[in-house]
Amino acid sequence: MSDARGHVDLSHTITDGMDTYPGLPAPVIGTHLSREAAEEVYGPGMTFQIGMIEICTNTGTYLDVPFHRYADGHDLSELPLARVAAVPAVCLDVRGSTVIEVAGDELSGLGGHAVLFRTDHSHHFGTPAYAEGHPYLSTATAEALVACGVACVGIDSLNIDSTEGGERPVHSTLLGADVPIIEHLTNLSSLPGSGFTFTAVPPKIVGAGTFTVRAFATVAD
């Protein structure tokens, strides 16, 4: 879905109790100050609501920085905005592939770009099928992205790596080169192949390597 200014929302909506990734806790969304209680504090008719959220940092659409994989990698508080804010971007249509292979020559000229991989696996988000046979990048593709000098990499799938075993070579390769990863994107079918910018900015949290983002594209007229 896009708005009148060409903003295309690429994030899943977060709701109380939703599932993002098998085995991770669901968010709990509640109230710290209710509107009824606020009237007792501020006076009749003066209502405010202050919420409380208990949330795993890997909830909905989220971003990984090096600290997620490496103890000496930078955390969210040190993420350069130049990598994730209004970055020139491309969307590569890789539908039909489980193991996504993209050669270096296909990435020519994409230094400093956000590279988004459209698999349409996001259609299964929130269902058991989302964790089954999900698309992921090959190690060679991750190495080609690093060699190209991309700004960040995103995918609309459960994981950018295979989850068949414990190895995570794509995370290791990209985060080892300070390339942020955005997983669980959605609505990539609304994007053109190029001619847009990508934004996915998390809060500045010390000691965290992942967090939920509001990812969106801005498409030129």
Image: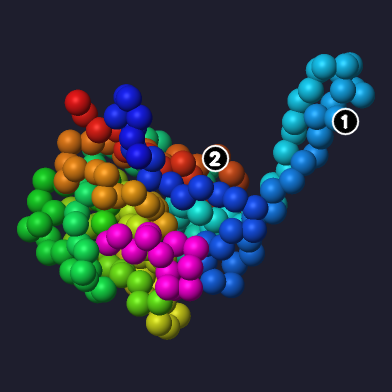
Alpha-carbon neighbours of circle 1 within 10 Å: few (<14), some, or many (≥20)?
some
Residue 167 is left or right of residue 206, and the answer is left
Residues marked 2 and 1 touching at CB (< 8 Å): no
Q: Check the image and name the residue furthest to the left.
A: 105
Q: Which quarter of the picture shows residue 197?
A: top left
Q: Which quarter of the picture shows residue 183?
A: bottom left
- In the structure shown, which secondary structural element does the residue marked by tag 1 occupy? helix
Q: Which mark is residue 37?
A: 1
Residue 180 x %, y %: 38, 52
Residue 103 lies in the magenta-colored region: no
Magenta range is 119-131
Q: Check the image and name the residue furthest to the right.
A: 40
Residue 89 is left or right of residue 132, and the answer is left
Alpha-carbon neighbours of circle 2 within 10 Å: few (<14), some, or many (≥20)?
few
Magenta part, dominant SS = helix
Q: Which mark is residue 58?
A: none
Give the residue type at disc 1.
Ala
Q: Which residue is depicted at the point 24% across and 43% down?
A: 191
**Quarter of the image where the N terminus is located:** top left
Q: Which mark is residue 203?
A: 2
Residue 218: in sight, yes or no? Answer: yes
Residue 178: in sight, yes or no? Answer: no
**Quarter of the image where the C terminus is located:** top left
Residue 163 is left or right of residue 57, and the answer is left
Q: Is residue 169 above or below residue 29?
A: below
